[in-house]
Amino acid sequence: MITRAILIAAFAFAPLLPPPTAAAERKVEGNRVTEGVPELPERITERMRQYQNTRSASVRGWTSNGDGLLISTRFGETNQLHLVEKPGGARRQLTFFAEPVRGAAVCPDLRRREFLFSKDVGGGESYQIYLFDMDSGEYEMVTDGASRNGYALWSDAGDRFVYYSTRRNGRDWDLVLSHSGTPGKAETILQRKGTWVPLDWAPDGRRLLVEQYVSVNESYLHLLDLENGESEQINPDAGKVSYGDAAWARDGEGIYLSSDQGDEFRRLKYFDLSSGTLTDLTADIPWDVVDLEISPLGDRLAFTTNEDGIGRLYLLDTATGEARSVPGVPVGQIYGLEFHPGNARLAFVVNTARTPGDIYVLDVADYALERWTYSEVGGLDTDSFAVPELIHYDTFDSLDGQPRQVPAFYYKPEGDGPHPVLIRIHGGPESQFRPYFSSSNQYYVGELGLAILAPNVRGSAGYGKGYLKLDNGYLREDTVRDIGRLLDWIEAQPELDSERVGVLGGSYGGYMVLAAMTHYNQRLKCAIDVVGISNFVSFLENTKDYRRDLRRVEYGDERDPAMRDFLLRISPTTNAHKITKPLFIAQGFNDPRVPVGESEQMVETIRSNDGQVWYLLFKDEGHGFRKKQNRDYYQNTVVLFMEEHLLK
C-alpha cells in the first residue's frame, strides 16, 4: 500500500511539513487511492455516463499518397490512432495500447507506408518514439526507452527524421537524427544546454530550422547545417523576442514565422535569408498568429489567429502577400492544419462550445468545406448547450489612466437565478481559457444550474506580451487579486449568488485555487485543486530537471535567498491555516511536472489544521487524467463534492 510517509520521503518534503497527524482512512482500489471521499451515488454515475461518452477527433496527417487521413480519437479507454479514407468514412483503428498515443508524423516517402508516434507509461511523460508499418501493423521503438523524446519530424524526402531527446543527461534537449533504413540508430546533431526543438527541414534537406526556447517571452531561431554541424542564429539583432510557429518557404530563400518583435502580439512575418530583412504580413490583424502551414507547392500559407479567445483561419497568397479570412468555417477553435500532398486541400479541426473537435477539409480554390468525421456526443442535444459570453471586468490597477480589465468567459444557466457560481482558472500560467467543447462544463450548467466564470487573469497568453509579463516573479499574487475583483463583479450581478461560489483549477490553476482560498476564504464555499502547486520552493526543487530552469524564469529562482523567502511566504502551505472551507485535491502519482508531494503535503497541512479535505490519487496517471475510467471517477467525484459543498 502507498503510505503518505513513503510519498513524502520520496520527494524530500519533510522539512516543509507540520508534525504528523492522524489521516482519514485511505482506501486503495486498484490504481485508485482515496481519502475522505464518500461512496458515489448511482444517480450521479448514471446521469454523467452520457456526458462522459462524448469523443473528439484530431488530425495527425495525410497518408503519403493522400488517400486518407491519420487521426486520433478514443473508442476505449485512451486516444489511439485511426485511418479515415473518405468524408464520413469508418474510423479504422491502427494502434491498440493501454496508454494514450501522443501525436504522429507520417513518412512522406510513397514507398514507405509508415508513421512515427509517441507514448509514455502511466503519465510519466518519458515519451518514447515508435515506427509503425501500416501494411504489416508492426511497430518498433526507435528511442532508448528511458529518456524523454519528441517533436519527431521527417525530411521532405522521407529518408530521415529528427527529434529532441534528453538521453544525454536527463535535462538538456539535444537533437538527434535517424535514417529510415536504420531508425533505431540515432546520431546527435546538436548538443547544447537548454531546450532545443526542430521546426522544419529546408527543402533541399541540408539544413534544419531549430528553436531555442528560453521562456514564453524569449526564444531564438537557428539554422543548423547538417553537413558541417554549424548553426547560426537568424534575425540576430532583434533582441529578446518570442517566436511562435515557423516554416521554410518552398524555394528555400526565406522563412515564414510568427513573432512579437516590435509588437505586443505575434504577427506573421517573412524573413529573407539573403538580405536579413523581416516583412510584416499581418499588420492589420491585432492578434496572435498561432499555427501556420505551407502548401506542398509553396503557393499558399494557411494560418490561424487567436482573436480574443476565438480561432480564425486565413489563407495567404505567397506571391502577393495578401491574406484572406476563410469564410464558412464554424465559429470556434481551429487547429491541426495539414495540407494534402496534392496541394489543393487543407485539413483541420473545428471545436466549438457546443460541438467536440471534428475534422473538416477545405478546397483552397473555392473554399468548399467538407466534414470528414462525426464524433459521438452521447446522444445529447448539443443545440441546448450553453454558449459562453465574453465579458470584461475592472481589476485593481489601471492602464493608460483607465481601470485595467480582465476578460472572462461566462456560461449562464437557464432561469433568473440567483445561480451558484463556479470559477474555473486555467493552468500555465502562460495559457489561456478558450471555449473549447467541454461536456463537464455543460453538465455543471445544464444539470446542476451552475454559472461558470472562466477568467483570463494577468499572465494569460493571447492578450499581448505586456499582459503576459504582469505576473512574473514578485508580481505573482497580483493574479490572485484579479480573482478578488471577479468576486466583486459577481456580487454586483443580481442573477448570481455570491454566497455560493466555488473555485476549480489544475496545475498552476491549482495553485490559484489554493491561493484564492487563503486570500478569500470567507467569500468562497469550497475549492477543487487538481495537480496543483502548494509550495513554490518544493515544486521548483522537485519538478523534472528538463523543465526546472523554464519554470524559474516564470516564478523566480528559489536559490536566491530573497526570492526564496518571498516564494515561501506566498505559498499555500504557509497560509493553509487560513482555509476553513472544504477542499477536494486530486493528483496523479507519476506527475513529472507538479510532483505528487505537492498534493500530499497540502493534504497533510490541511488535516493538521483540522480542515476538511477529500483526496484522490491515481497511481497510473501523471499531470492530469488521460484514462477514461479514471477521468470518469474524478468527474463524478467533483459533481458529488459540489452537490455537498457548493449547491446546498
Image (tube, grey):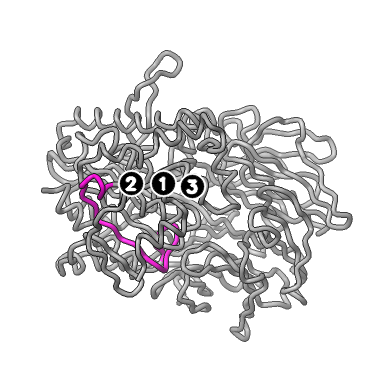
Mark count: 3
Secondary structure beneath dot 1 equals: loop
Q: Which amino acid does label 2 sit on?
A: Pro
Identify which residue, 92 or 39, lies in the foreground. Answer: 39
Q: Can residue 384 be seen in this view?
A: no
Q: Position of residue 521 (x, y in %)?
A: 23, 36
Above or below, 25 against 365 in this view is: below
- Left or right of 553, for residue 176: right
Q: What residue type is labelled 3?
A: Pro
- Residue 18: give its label: 2
Q: Position of residue 72 (x, y in %)?
A: 49, 68
Q: Where is residue 255 in the image (x, y as percent from the top left)?
A: 73, 45
Distance from disc 1 to disc 3, alpha carbons, whole Å, reads 43 Å
Q: Give the range drawn in magenta.
A: 606-626
* Callout 1 crowding tier (Cα within 10 Å): few <14, some 14–19, many ≥20: many
Identify which residue, 284 or 533, lies in the foreground. Answer: 533
What residue does disc 3 label? 327
Q: Give the number of the mark in front: 2 or 1.
A: 2
Q: Which amino acid does label 1 sit on?
A: Ile
Secondary structure beneath dot 3 equals: loop
What residue does disc 1 label? 533
Task: Tell me which corner region of the image, top left, top right, bottom left or bottom right, holds residue 567.
Answer: top left
